[in-house]
Image (tube, rainbow, N blue to C red):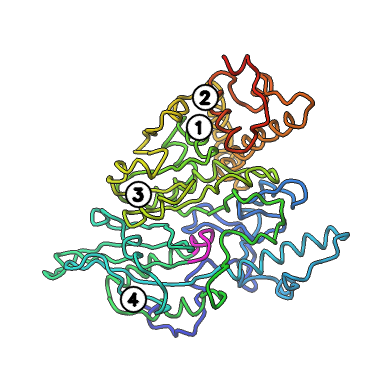
Amino acid sequence: MSRMVERSDRDPLLDWEEIPSAEKPGDEAPAASPAEERPSDSRGAAGCSGFGWSSGSGGPAPPSRSEADGCSAPPVTSSAQPAALERAQPPDKEEHPSDAGAREVSLEDRMVKWEEKDQIVSVFVVTFNTRTGNMLEWCLPKDMDLEGVEFKAIASGSHRVSTDFIYFRKGRYFGLACFANMAVESTEERGARMKSVGILSPSYTLLYRYMSFLEHQVRLQLQSPGHYSPLEAFYEDKRALLPPSGEHVVTAFPANAWGAAINHSMHPEMKITHPAGCMSQFIRFFGEQIMVLWKLALLRRRILIFSPPPVGVVCYRVYCCCCLANISIPGVGVAVPEFRPFFYVNVADISALENELSYVACTTEKIFEEKKDLYDVYVDNQNVKTYRDGLKPLLRLSAADREKYRKLTEQRQMLLYSQEENGDCMSSEEDLFILFFLEQNNRIFQTLSEVAGSPDPTITQDSVRAMGLDPHGDRLFLLHLLEIYGYDSLLVSEQLCCS
């Protein structure tokens, strides 16, 4: 039996997680190595927006690129806060507004307090039974509503792969499950044992921390079924303190931490454990087509991505699509539907998707392609298609799209050269990718705001070019954008309209 099974349920589980170097007394805090098995947590540096949020005026300053990747500062978790931060004020007690420096500390302290609350609401084991199919084998707490989770934690078609991981949504919660398939000499199990170990949390942003733990546990469950003590200890150590009713749980980020400057359509950063890197793979996979996905994401369309298993890397594509729609200008997008990641979905999610105005999700079930009322855009491999006539012209790349993609590729090549030649670990492709599209989006809406506030609120070819768009090729995209974001009062010049 493994050491992890034998340990006391009351012991802390820090050796199952990433341990910040600052926790090792007498040791120097070495810089995190990009070759480490798990990603470093970049959430602790002062002013570091490890969550991937940016703010406009009135909010905290954006992080420097050297801090955002976690290479220049040791990772900080809720268990490794300095004594001064442990004695931080409660969130409802704010510093005097006139003291800007003290206010920044208060905001950081509130981030720390929030991170401690962003924990686990359930842990479970799902198994495949040759007679009944997927079934929930074990869970904590026992009264948790986990109906349907057995079909989320083991994706359709998973019997074809040996391991996988799956991000998904379950009601108001987000989940991560690790799946494994092991050959066994058992007639009853038909030669294969398949299980998945998963967790639920109010937010998807920190689920990656537990990836290695879940991978280890699913292997343990395959080899020694029924030994749940490590999972019980994990749940006791990590369980969230939620209101008795379960209502008003933390979702992605507490609204009062950054104030009204945070736009609700932004999505927190989810550090990636895939060795090739999420963003670089996303760019290589879709190529210029990411410019098409960018426009559709900004228009808050319903995007469904199909792929056969393994589904883990496809869940990362869902996340990358969300990053395309980031906006940090206060007030922009407040009235548009929230662009939410559903991650993996199956036929059991059809009724939920029918009520969604805007989402991005992935599936392994080909039957979804026939459910044309559930999505606006269907992505099969690198093929992006739509059955909606009004969106079909948006699938064609404009001259401005190609120019933007050229600039993105150029910036990536410069970054990769710097990393290879100079050993630069202070910047990452993820930071570059998120910032690139954030700046593109801000540029569009900043120009629209300026035109709306001018004596002659007319969008001309010059103002379209100022947005980084093509006056001819992006005309329809712009018209959709004006309608979706409520800029109906703006006039479009006849020259642009009729071009």
Looking at marks 2 and 1 on the same chain, the residue that comes earlier in the sequence is marked by 1
The residue mark sitting in front, 4 or 2, is 4
Looking at marks 2 and 3 on the same chain, the residue that comes earlier in the sequence is marked by 3
Q: From the viewer's perspective, tell me whether residue 277 is left or right of residue 453.
A: left
Residue 370 included in the magenta stretch of the image: no
Quarter of the view holding residue 27:
bottom right
Per the model, the C-alpha gap separating discs 3 and 4 is: 25 Å
Q: Which residue is mark 4?
A: 138
Whether residue 385 appears in this view of the structure is no
Tell me the quadrant of the picture where the N terminus can be found. bottom left
Location of residue 232 in the rendering, given as x and y in whole percent from the top left corner: 42, 80
Residue 84 is labelled as none
Quarter of the view holding residue 177:
bottom left
Q: Which residue is mark 3?
A: 363
Residue at 66% across / 37% down in the picture?
442
For label 2, the SS is: helix
Do the residues under discs 2 and 1 have CB atoms within 8 angstroms?
yes
Q: Taking 195 as reference, is 52 above or below it?
A: above
Location of residue 117 in the rendering, given as x and y in whole percent from the top left corner: 59, 70
Residue at 58% across / 53% down in the picture?
268
Per the model, the C-alpha gap separating discs 2 and 3 is: 29 Å
Q: Which residue is mark 2?
A: 402
> Which amino acid, mark 1?
Met
Per the model, the C-alpha gap separating discs 3 and 1 is: 22 Å
- As drawn, which residue projects farthest toward the right? 98
Residue at 49% across / 73% down in the picture?
15
Q: Which residue is mark 1?
A: 291
